[in-house]
Amino acid sequence: MLSPIRLISEAAELAARRHNGVARKGRGNEPYINHLAEVANLLATATDGADAELVAAGWLHDSIEDTDTTREELAQRLSERVASLVVECTDDMDLPKAERRRKQIEDAPHKSPSAKLIKIADKVSNIGARIQSDPTTEERDELADYAGWAEQVVAGCRGGNPWLDTKFDDAVKAARALL
């Protein structure tokens, strides 16, 4: 078993390598690793650093669906729990977007408490990335659509961490102020 600091460091390095050169959607075109860092940091803050495996899973929550990373690799390199959490947060990319979204809403209440925290942190980060100064009409519509859907997903995830729930509410409030 890796020490907590090594576990998080290994997860961050693996996330950076697997998402190297990938940019986030939107005008900012920021490196995708920034999203993963933000999710991991939200989780570290929400738990006051008490759950290294959760933070590691935050770094890697998109790795299976977006890269050639496997569950087995995560279990071997990091831990069984990290691998399980990442799998629990992985969408089936073979499904159409509308079906993936519907499944996230439907599955949210049945996730483990830790996976629910990852889902909320992910939505906080994604809403924040969609908040642009002087948004175009298309960006406003996209933000409204995403925020509305995220609220439905997070409704099934709330209650595990009041600080993270508030961060989500604040992100939605900031988004609505632009609409």
Image (tube, grey):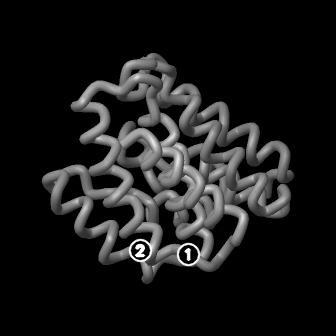
Location of the N terminus (image quadrant): bottom right
Write the residue at 22% across / 31% down.
Answer: 138
Write the residue at 24% across / 60% down.
Answer: 100
Location of the C terminus (image quadrant): top left
Considering only vertical position in the picture, is 113 above or below 80? below
Write the residue at 70% across / 71% down.
Answer: 162
Specify whether residue 75 is in view.
no
Find numbered disc 2 in the image and state the secondary structure of the residue it sits on.
Answer: helix
Residue 163 place in picture, x, y as percent: 72, 64
- Residues at circles 2 and 1 in contact by the CB criterion of under 8 Å: no
Indicate left or right for 100 with 56 as reference. left
Residue 61 place in picture, x, y as percent: 51, 50
Considering only vertical position in the picture, is 96 above or below 157? above
Specify whether residue 22 is in view.
yes
Residue 177 place in picture, x, y as percent: 46, 45
Viewer-proximal residue among 84 and 154:
154
Residue 93 circle label: none
Indicate left or right for 20 with 82 as reference. left
Crowd band around label 1 with a 10 angstrom C-alpha radius: few (<14), some (14–19), many (20+): many
The CA span between labels 2 and 1 is 9 Å
Residue 130 place in picture, x, y as percent: 42, 36
Crowd band around label 2 with a 10 angstrom C-alpha radius: few (<14), some (14–19), many (20+): many
| Residue on which the image places disc 1 | 158
Q: Residue furthest bottom?
A: 110
* Mark 2 or mark 1: whose residue is earlier in sequence: 2
Question: What amino acid does circle 2 point to?
Answer: Ala
Viewer-proximal residue among 165 and 4:
165
Of marks 2 and 1, the one in the foreground: 1
| Residue on which the image places disc 2 | 108
Find numbered disc 1 in the image and state the secondary structure of the residue it sits on.
Answer: loop
Q: Quadrant of residue 13?
A: top right
Question: What amino acid does circle 1 point to?
Answer: Arg
